[in-house]
Image: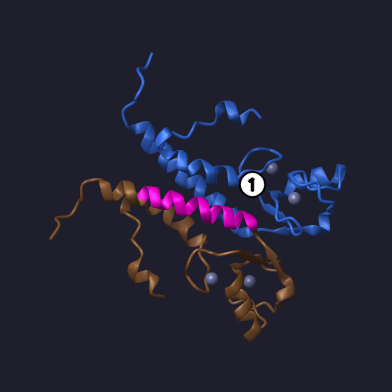
Chain colours: A brown, B blue
Amino acid sequence: MAQFLTEPEWPQSLTCLKNIDALLRCTICFDYIDIAMMIQQCSHNYCSLCIRKFLSLKTQCPLCNLTVTESDLRNNRVLDDLVKSFRSVRQQFLQIDSESPPKTPQA
Amino acid sequence: MAQFLTEPEWPQSLTCLKNIDALLRCTICFDYIDIAMMIQQCSHNYCSLCIRKFLSLKTQCPLCNLTVTESDLRNNRVLDDLVKSFRSVRQQFLQIDSESPPKTPQA
Ligand SMILES: [Zn+2]
Ligand SMILES: [Zn+2]
Ligand SMILES: [Zn+2]
Ligand SMILES: [Zn+2]
């Protein structure tokens, strides 16, 4: 959960990108999905490591509680490509925003 | 292919969003993916209708030529959500850009 404290907030002008940001995150670790694995029955996605660790303790999808095992996992490579592209978009937009004059007075 | 002629171009300031745009399009119809279906063996995605029509003629993935049938298709729902969010982002950015002063003289 530590990343919530250190990650920069989306500036207000870019809140429309927040939805995409949320869709590309893993609901186990809250970071961007790393090596996306989709559960074939319910279509939910997690980091490969996160979901494998989870399934070794409990054979359920963490989001919908469907009974699943490791053999139900499928690579979802377009998500890996989307995470990569989105990270660079994010970098560029946050950069642009930090270069524009601040709207609130600085201490 | 007609949409290439009528769709607005990404303005230069937003070319970084072009990669995401490309990843969310179907390589059969070139439009944004509509009801995303992933081929489980190769992880390639297409519109449900596009890939079903294609497989009825040829039992191959159009991108990698792997032998596949309809039973290998899996819903990829996060892509549907991403397309929805991205369309609204796109709308907002193109709107903002059309409101900013033009960089080239108008006829
Ligand atoms: Zn994770
Ligand atoms: Zn699930
Ligand atoms: Zn299509
Ligand atoms: Zn393929």
The mark tally for this picture is: 1
Which image quarter holds the N terminus of chain B? top right
Query: Which residue reaches farthest top?
Result: B107
Viewed as shown, does residue B85 lie left or right of B75?
left
* Residue B55 forms part of the magenta stretch: no
Q: Quadrant of residue B94?
A: top left
**Is B11 located above or below residue B80 in the figure?**
above
**Is A16 located above or below residue A72 in the figure?**
above
Q: Amino acid at mark 1?
A: Ile
Q: Residue at x 52, y 60 (%)?
A: A24
Viewed as shown, does residue B4 lie left or right of B100?
right
Q: Is mark 1 within 8 Å of ligand 3?
A: yes
Which image quarter holds the C terminus of chain B? top left
Residue A41 spot, x, y in % from top left: 71, 68
The span shown in magenta is A77-93
Q: Which residue is mark 1?
A: B33
Query: Which residue reaches farthest bottom?
Result: A57
